[in-house]
Amino acid sequence: MGRRFAVWTDRVESEVVRVESLSQAGSFKSRIKKRVIHRPMAMLERYVIKRATIGLFHGQQTYDAYAPFSKKPVIVHDIHVNRDAHITDDAFSAKIASARYDPLNIVYVGRATAMKGPLHWASALKELSVAGIDFKAHWLGDGPMLADLRAQLEADGLMDRVTLHGFVDDPAQVTARLQAAHIFLFCHTTPESPRCLIESLIAGTPIIGYDGSYAADLISNAGGGHLVPIGDIEGLGKRLVQLSNDRDQLVELNKRAREDGRPFDDETVFAHRSEVIKRFLSRQQE
């Protein structure tokens, strides 16, 4: 119809499907289907993006994947946390006191799927156990690999330290877990821009996990996290051990995470996206 339009992406969907096709999760038929369709998906993604007036790409990693095909690429963020949900000064003081002396408190919030690397997550926790580090960990989220995650934790003798909460429908409970944690441990294996990393920083919790341009961009200002190459479970485990043994460094990382989380709230990010849309898609531009 010749109209101006925007395209918005949350993750590189075709790459997510490709990675899932290589995992052992899901049925054989499902994996074969994904191996067949991920290439046509990528072609269709590029077809639409090339014809869009603007490309609204959620986070640096999604932007890096799609910007070369867009006439006007813009980084946007998609979060649903208001300013009041940021950790308060009193709650942060309690968090810092805990980080100095209590057993390492680790959390992850997300679905147990191949792209989230739940078995990598469990293996990183095993590194802590082998090193004799006292810790507790929480996984909030359901998913097709939750049973596999439980089986690995049981095999490694970690179920007395790890709680698998499954699906949690109470946002206040999720926020409380994020704010109480000393570390947000993540093992994402595909190019995506998950909101949980922003929600962790808003809670003053440093993000420790696999490298990617999205995560790196989020902590580029204050350095509220630490990233290792994708698949480097040993490096991830060593970093966790180091932070447990150096509580001054852990406290500093929590403070830096809070600084990196300050710019993010729903009104700010949606106002930015709206302004971009109005600027490039208004009737005056036609």
Image (cartoon, rainbow, N blue to C red):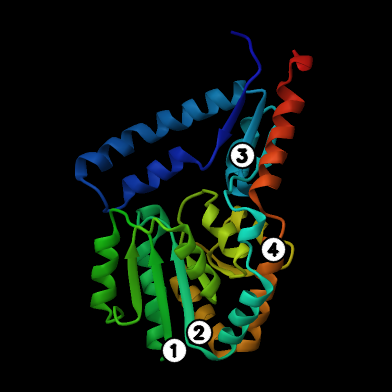
Side (left or right) of 137 relative to 259:
left
**The C terminus: image quadrant:** top right
User: Which tag, 3 or 4, sits closer to the chain's start?
Assistant: 3
| Mark 2 neighbour class, 10 Å CA radius: few under 14, some 14 to 19, many 20 or more | many
Residue positioned 46% across, 70% down in the render: 107
- Name the residue type under label 4: Asp
Q: Are marks 1 and 2 in contact (CB under 8 Å)?
A: yes
Quadrant housing residue 71: top right
Label 2 secondary element:
helix
Q: Which residue is mark 4?
A: 260
Q: Residue at x 27, y 43 (%)?
A: 31
For badge 1, the amino acid type reads Ile
For marks 1 and 2, give the CA distance.
Answer: 7 Å
Q: Nearer the viewer, mark 1 or mark 4?
A: 4
Residue under the point 61% across and 86% down: 97
Q: Considering the numbered disc 4 on the image, is that residue within a helix, a strand or a loop?
A: helix
Q: Give the spatial CA distance, label 1 vs label 3.
A: 40 Å
Q: Which corner quadrant holds the N terminus?
A: top right
Q: Position of residue 46 (x, y in %)?
A: 54, 28
Which residue is labeled 3 in the image? 57
Is residue 223 visible in the rendered image? The answer is no
Q: Find disc 1 in the rendering and name its residue.
A: 133
Q: Is residue 244 left or right of residue 88?
A: left
- Report helix, strand or loop for mark 1: loop
Q: Nearer the viewer, residue 246 or 79?
A: 79
**Residue at which label 2 appears:** 241
Where residue 176 appears, x then y in whole percent?
50, 69
Q: Residue at x 55, y 90 (%)?
A: 245
